Image (cartoon, rainbow, N blue to C red):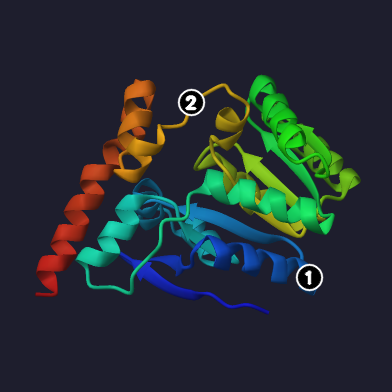
Amino acid sequence: MSRVERTSVLGVPVDRVDFDGAVAHVEALLDSGMKRQCVLAMNPEKVMRLKGDPALFEFVSGAALLIPDGYGVVLAAKILGLPSLTLVTGVDLMVRLARLAESRGFGVFLFGGTEEANRGAAESLARTMPALKISGRRNGYFDQGKEHEVVALINQCRPDMLFVALGSPRQEAWMRRFLPQLDVGICQGVGGTFDVLGGVARRAPKAVQRLRLEWLYRLLADPSRAKRQAALPRFAAEVLRERLRTL
């Protein structure tokens, strides 16, 4: 089985992997027959959240793959003199994993997002990947206490890959609670990816992505993200403090 090297940024684990390595690792996990393997995205917001949440930290640390999804994490590794990290965005990795599923005949299940985003994402994937087996889908809105019905639906569809788009930290909390009950091979937390794939939200233009300013584009497009992104200056301060400590 392929292996990935794990390092840590401010004490929080993250994997040294690129897109090809991430896809190869997931394929190897599926071929091994292993179940309930998590793929999670690491960004500055999540790093700061995990530092204050021991239970979530423990769950995330046990994930099969922790991709460097935010450029802040990649830059922090460079500033701190850590092994270099490659930016692996969750939305692009999901698309690549869907292409892997199409080529290998793996089934996928889309869980989360609004009904519009969920349906749109499924239709977009079906349109661009005609041979992709979409085993099932379910939006992320349900009454409290109905979680077990969602788990039963997913297990009934028996997907190889489960994409969970509940937003962070809700999706990680959901996976932590219900993953032991799921009959799936890979479970990837994909945040707002369904919104992008389903045409509900626009992704930053390529030029903005190349400048590593996608986070700023998202903030300007959705000012409600300001509260979440308040973690960014705290993250920067922690990185600076750690750098000064190691001089």
Q: Callout 2: helix, strand or loop?
A: loop
Residue at image x 14%, y 61%? Answer: 241
Horizontal side of residue 197 vs 147, given as left or right: left
Q: Is residue 30 left or right of residue 116?
A: right
Can residue 141 be seen here? Answer: no
Residue 213: x percent and y percent? 30, 39
Residue 27 image offset from top left, x and y in percent: 71, 66
Picture coordinates of residue 131 (x, y %)? Answer: 83, 44
Residue type beneath disc 1: Asp
Residue at x 63%, y 77% (from the top left corner): 2
Say which of 73 and 173 sits in front.
73
Name the residue tied to disc 1. Answer: 31
Quadrant of residue 153 in the image?
top right
Could you classify mark 2 by the number of other residues whose Cα lies within 10 Å: few (under 14), some (14-19), or many (20 or more)?
few
Quadrant (top left, top right, bottom left, bottom right) of the N terminus? bottom right
Pick the front one: 85 or 229: 85
**Residue closest to the eye, 67 or 96:** 96
- Give the structural element (helix, strand or loop) at label 1: helix
Report how far apart the C-alphas of labels 1 and 2 lie in the structure: 35 Å
> Mark 1–mark 2 contact, CB under 8 Å?
no
Q: Quadrant of residue 221?
A: top left
User: Is residue 214 positioned above or below 45 on the image?
Assistant: above
Residue 151 seen in this snapshot: yes
- Mark 1 vs 2, N-terminal side: 1
Residue 162 in the image, given as x and y percentages of width and height: 72, 48
* 139 horizontally vs 157: left or right: left
Residue at the image position 72 percent from the left and 56 percent from the top: 100
Residue 176 to residue 134: above or below? below
Number of the label disc, if any, that sits on residue 202? 2
Query: What's the amino acid at mark 2?
Result: Arg
Q: Residue furthest right?
A: 156
Question: Callout 1: 10 Å neighbours few (<14), some, many (20+)?
Answer: few
